[in-house]
Image (cartoon, rainbow, N blue to C red):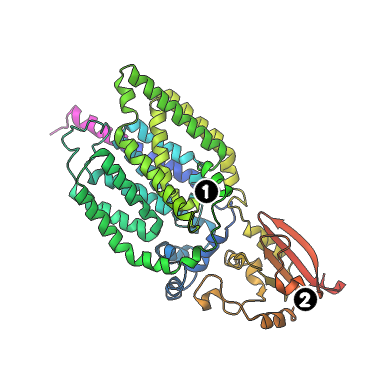
Amino acid sequence: MTEGPGAATGGKARWRDLAVLVIPALVTLAVSTWGIRGPSYWRDEAATVSAVRRSLPAMLAMLARVDAVHGVYYLLLWPVAHTLGTGELAMRLPSALAMAATAALIVAIGRRLVSARAGLAAGMIWAFLPVTSWYGQDARSYALVTSLACAASYLFLRATGTADSGSADSGSADSGSADTGSRAWYSMSLIALGLVNVFGLLLIPAHAVTLVLTNRGSLTRWRAAAFTAVAVTLPLMVFVWRQRVDVARIPALDQHEADTVFAWAGSVRASEFALLILLIGAAFAAAGQLAGKSAGASAFPRELVALCLPWLALPLAALIAVSLVKPIFEFRYALFSLPAVALLLGAAVAVLGRAAATITIAALALIAFPAQQAVRAAQGHYENIREIDRVIAANERPGDAVLYPGDGWRQAAAAYPYGLATLEDVTLDQTPVQADNLLGTDLPPAQQAARLRQHDRVWILAQSENQTGPLLSDNEAFQLARTWHIADAWLQLYVRSGPDHL
């Protein structure tokens, strides 16, 4: 039996739907992998390298003491490191893949709540945001957390019976029914989200607000799924709380945090242009609605706004509120909220029409391009450990030592196998592997001084130019020979007095 024209049309529609999902994901992957080796590792990435380079028992022993909040991410990355090595491409590629998956999920959410055009626009906008590339080229858990938050939000929509595109029609047959299978998957996605990073569970109260605003589904059934996720991840939350000293270094809220939030897209210019897009799209939608056009009314459906605003605002507000008492705010902890902005922008772009939408997305990509280049520079992640190691490798002599006067710079030695990794750490007693942590332990001051006397040349790596530490601050036997200011770090070489040591 031959297939009729309806089957052919249906086949084309399925391929078109698949393309709408896949194209933004592939573009995001291409953008995220472009120049992925360019930025040097920074200290947090060095912590990842330090953790996953160990044997599995040694890594588990470390997690029992520190960094349990990233434990599942380290476990996922461990086989990658022991198969492909700890180079930038191998360590960062999982994040790039996670950002690509996020793009596809953004499309799926946008298509379900608004239209295929809005979903496609949101996915493409996500691909071109500099912040997507920054964390897509970062060997940390935040890209994966963002992807899991998108998956949880999509499954939340299915579990609560929100209809496919055009869901503003609350009278549709399936709008009030809950998908039992999706509820189970939704609960599992929340569990995965919490295990990869407990801050991701801030998505749960955001979903609760969405449910109240839309009157969708059964609150009892949703509560069971959310409670299950919290119960399963509770032991990890307790463990992370016991290791809260890990975040004691986070400073109080100041202008830096405000500037980071203001430049949420990865640059101030891109963030401002995105806001302009949203305002213009909202104005077009409002004008259409006043004119009695259905397109204006459906541009920003209630379900879209009710999902995106709590998703965007509640995690950020919770972190800020807690930080007023106990500093804990880092913008990357709320990164998983940014897909909500992309969804709103996609809806705003879609209402402008196909030609204007294409031009707007192209303009955003062009405006964001300088920030994209900056992200891929050697110091694109603020710190340039690679250059520090290259300077040391080019100027070191046998027997050189190193001092890390505070600021956790010792962690940087794990990033690359040359430079810092080849120097003797004057103050080090137990190595990080021996101490089951990321920084090792220090010798008593007297033993540190005795070890220093065995060296004629000492490198200092610190956050400020005059941060030499107690061993050298009043030590007249050493004099400053040379200084390098590399990104936000100061590298200095001290030598014993006399021409033979220069």
**Span colored in magenta:** 1-17
10 Å neighbourhood of mark 2: few (<14), some, or many (≥20)? many
Looking at the rendering, which quadrant does residue 15 occupy? Answer: top left
Vertical position of residue 493 compared to residue 305: above or below: below
- Residue tagged 2: 456
> CA separation, marks 1 and 2?
41 Å
- Front position in the image: 185 or 231: 231
Q: Residue furthest right?
A: 499
Q: Residue at x 58, y 64 (%)?
A: 415
Q: Is residue 261 left or right of residue 398?
A: left
On-image quarter of the C terminus: bottom right
- Residue tagged 1: 134
Q: Pinpoint residue 303: horizontal percent, then vertical percent.
A: 29, 36
Q: Residue at x 43, y 63 (%)?
A: 69
Q: Is residue 305 left or right of residue 444?
A: left
Looking at the rendering, which quadrant does residue 369 occupy? Answer: top right
| Residue 11 painted magenta | yes
Vertical position of residue 10 compared to residue 332: above or below: above
Q: Residue furthest left?
A: 1
Q: Pinpoint residue 196: horizontal percent, then vertical percent.
A: 39, 59
